[in-house]
Image (spheres, rainbow, N blue to C red):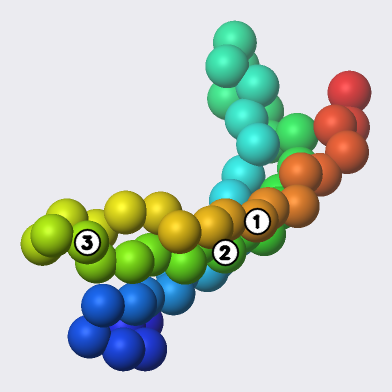
Amino acid sequence: MIVHPDLAFEYGIFKDLQLSDHKILGTGKYSVTWILENSIWKILCHTWSMPEKKM
């Protein structure tokens, strides 16, 4: 979502997968704030919550 001509915000949910068998170990949330500098979108800041792994 663009909140200003040179500022955008993105958020969502991600899955943490085990590479060997693609088992889902957990899910987490993330958010990213983007800034437009010299016609290039760059990450201004980001946060995420990493789930505890269920082994």
Nearest to viewer (mark 3 / mark 2)? 3
Instruction: From the viewer's perspective, tell me whether residue 54 is left or right of residue 23.
Output: right
Give whichever of 30, 42 is nearer the camera: 42
Q: Which mark is first along the chain, 2 or 3?
A: 2
Quadrant in which the N terminus appears: bottom left
x and y percentages locating residue 9 in the rendered image: 44, 74
Q: Which residue is mark 2?
A: 31
Which residue corresponds to the image point at 75% horizontal and 34% vertical from the top-left? 25
Which residue corresponds to the image point at 13% horizontal and 60% vertical from the top-left? 38
Evaluate if marks 1 and 2 touch, with contact meaning CB atoms under 8 Å apart: yes
Instruction: From the viewer's perspective, tell me whether residue 17 is left or right of residue 27.
Output: left
Q: Which mark is first along the chain, 2 or 1?
A: 2
Residue at the front extreme, as displayed: 38
Above or below, comparing residue 45 to residue 52 in the picture? below
Give whichever of 5, 47 is nearer the camera: 5
Above or below, comparing residue 47 to residue 20 in the picture? below
Q: Which residue is mark 3?
A: 37
Q: Amino acid at mark 3?
A: Glu
Q: Mark 2: give few (<14), some (14-19) or many (20+) Cα within 10 Å.
A: some
Which residue corresponds to the image point at 52% horizontal and 68% vertical from the top-left? 11
Instruction: From the viewer's perspective, tell me whether residue 15 is left or right of residue 8.
Output: right
Q: Amino acid at mark 2?
A: Ser
Q: Which residue is mark 1?
A: 47
Label 2 secondary element? strand
Alpha carbon distance from label 1 to label 3: 21 Å
Q: Mark 3: give few (<14), some (14-19) or many (20+) Cα within 10 Å.
A: few
